[in-house]
Amino acid sequence: MSDIDIRKTGRAGRITLTRAKALNALSYPMSLAVEAALDDWRNDDEVAVIVIDAEGDRAFCAGGDLTVMYETGRAGDFAFGQKFWRDEYRMNAKLFEFPKPVISLLQGFTMGGGVGLGCHGSHRIVCENSQIAMPECGIGLVPDVGGSLILSRAPGRLGEYLGCTATRMGPGDAILAGFADYYVPRADWPALIATLEDTGDWQAVDRAAQPAPEAPLAALRPKIDAHFGGETLGDIVRALRQDNSDFAVATLETMSRNSPLAMACTVEMMHRLRGRDTIRAALEQEYRFTHRAPEHSDFLEGIRAAIIDKDKSPRWQHPDMANVPAVDVSRMLMPLGAEALKLEEELA
């Protein structure tokens, strides 16, 4: 496949994204190819570690390929998106639970589907230009591909803040929030990869790591924790509206561009996951939303405004983000019954 290069090199199973001109956006066939490689290498004694990287300087993987999702959804074909998400989430779970070290090297943009591919391994490496984010609320979706679990585990209320604002994290913030583990300057990556291929020794990552850069979000933690500690999105918005600080004003402005329904569901998902702290619980809950998204959420309108027409003027279902009815959140996140994500049997 021309978009992805999968091979064994020495002691390493190697996955390289090769769509640099498309910011290495993850397509459905690419996701299936990664899953097949993981299945092949799980019990392959020649493979000691998995190393995932990408060509180009601008992005490890800037997200999923959404155009087909829009076209099929607009045509009333919701089954395509549902199958895409089921299969992608299964791959995400296999990465998270893989029994061997998985090393990912995350230059430039790592967003959305890129987080699902690059941020579930055991050794997640960032460099000088790394920018990691979960921007789904901007297109009417919730943080998915297992990203909701990482957000729910972030210190304090960083998860709610990052999920609702889609704030981009540089290398220091990515490590602070739990999306990355190691800082290694980009110039040192070729030598590190060569060592991993030659030896299969994952401890080479520890030896190559340097102190993490400053994390600007650390200084904002008191304000984030104070304003994003409410039970609902409405609580958060009202707390911000009662504060005329630069932080509150800027945060409200950022959130005003995102889907109120998606943000409300994101906040609820964070709270639920803190009581069910597993990748499978996260993916199962995400799928409740994404299964319904093309038909019942702001998802198609969000893609239209951001990607198709590019007018940046989405018409969201709820005009006031402080007043998303709880019943609307419940409808998007209630169990799917027979349609529920079935990772247990699919991963067996």
Image (cartoon, rainbow, N blue to C red):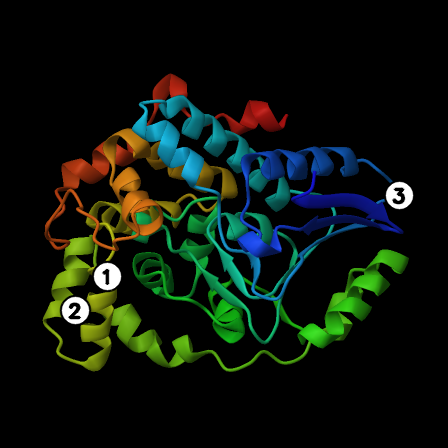
Residue 31 position in % (x across, y down): 59, 38
Neighbourhood count class around disc 2 (C-alpha, 10 Å): few under 14, some 14–19, many 20 upward: many
Residue 323 position in % (x across, y down): 10, 50
Neighbourhood count class around disc 3 (C-alpha, 10 Å): few under 14, some 14–19, many 20 upward: some
Q: Specify the label residue 185 is tagged with.
A: none
Q: Nearer the viewer, residue 250 or 101?
A: 250
Q: Nearer the viewer, residue 32 or 200?
A: 32
Marks 3 & 2, CB-CB < 8 Å contact: no
Q: Secondary structure at mark 1?
A: helix
What distance separates the C-alpha of mark 3 from that of mark 2?
54 Å
User: Which amino acid does the dot numbered 1 rest on?
Assistant: Met
| Disc on the earlier residue, 2 or 1 | 2
Which residue is under mark 1?
255
Residue at the (44%, 25%) spot, across then down? 80
User: Which amino acid does the dot numbered 3 rest on?
Assistant: Glu
Neighbourhood count class around disc 1 (C-alpha, 10 Å): few under 14, some 14–19, many 20 upward: many
What distance separates the C-alpha of mark 2 from that of mark 1?
11 Å
Residue 212 position in % (x across, y down): 58, 78
| Disc on the earlier residue, 3 or 1 | 3
Residue at the (15%, 58%) spot, across then down? 235
Mark 3 or 1, which is nearer the eye? Answer: 1
Q: Specify the label residue 240 is tagged with.
A: 2
Residue at the (53%, 29%) spot, across then down? 343
Which residue is under mark 3?
46
Q: Secondary structure at mark 3?
A: loop
Marks 3 & 1, CB-CB < 8 Å contact: no
Reply above or below: 126 against 29. below
Q: Is residue 195 visible?
A: yes
Q: Secondary structure at mark 2?
A: helix
User: Which amino acid does the dot numbered 2 rest on?
Assistant: Leu
Q: Is residue 196 left or right of residue 139?
A: right
